[in-house]
Amino acid sequence: MFKGFLLEFIFKKASIKYFIQYYFIDRLGRNAFDIQSILNLLSTLNINVYVENIGFYSMIDNKPNSIFKMITDVLSNVAEMERASLLERQKEGILIAKAKGTYKGRLLNTIETPQQFLSKYNQSHLELIKDKIIQLENLRQLPTY
């Protein structure tokens, strides 16, 4: 949800030069396709992406960095494999816990309304969801946790 609003905001302001920094490449998407398509979109918008843990920029002198592309392709596939193995280990752990009788899971017929779900979060999250307009200035003012 947040990713879409951020990209929409950047797309509207594409004439201004932007720079986005990520710590890990896997924070861009859930799988390799998502990560690569977001990187391609940002590249077409001439937005430079910096990935901190590998120390590379997506563009050097407004030209695509081929080493960045190669490394991010490999790392996005590795991240997808890690996610798949994490989900597999989680399922195995749930099965073991069910066999021991310690896993209860979610109670049957438990339904949470959107208002009940949102009431768990503080006001800053609610403002982001309500407005559906994210400006970078507002994001800078949000507290970090």
Image (cartoon, rainbow, N blue to C red):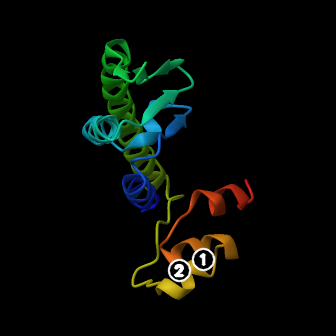
Residue type (three-letter) at the residue carrying disc 2: Lys
- Where residue 24 appears, as percent x and y from the top left, is 51, 31
Q: Residue at x 47, y 73 (%)?
A: 132
Q: Evaluate whether residue 72 shows in this view.
A: yes
Residue wearing tag 1:
126
- Please, what secondary structure does the residue beneath circle 1 have? helix
Residue 32 drawn above or below residue 57 = below
- Please, what secondary structure does the residue beneath circle 2 have? helix
Residue type (three-letter) at the residue carrying disc 1: Leu
Q: What numbered label is drawn on residue 105? A: none
Residue 96 drawn above or below residue 67 = below
Residue wearing tag 2:
130
- Where residue 104 appears, as percent x and y from the top left, is 50, 66
- Where residue 101 appears, as percent x and y from the top left, is 50, 59
Q: Are marks 2 and 1 in contact (CB under 8 Å)?
A: yes
Q: Residue at x 39, y 85 (%)?
A: 109
24 sits left or right of 142 in the view: left
Q: Residue at x 43, y 45 (%)?
A: 90
Q: Evaluate whether residue 122 shows in this view.
A: no
Screen quadrant of the N terminus: bottom left
- Where residue 13 appears, as percent x and y from the top left, is 43, 54
Label 1: how many residues lie within 10 Å, few (<14), some (14-19) or many (20+)?
some
Screen quadrant of the C terminus: bottom right
Q: Residue at x 51, y 38 (%)?
A: 20
Query: CA gap, disc 2 to disc 1?
Result: 6 Å
71 and 19: which one is in front? 19
Extreme residue toward the top, this view: 67
136 sits left or right of 83 in the view: right
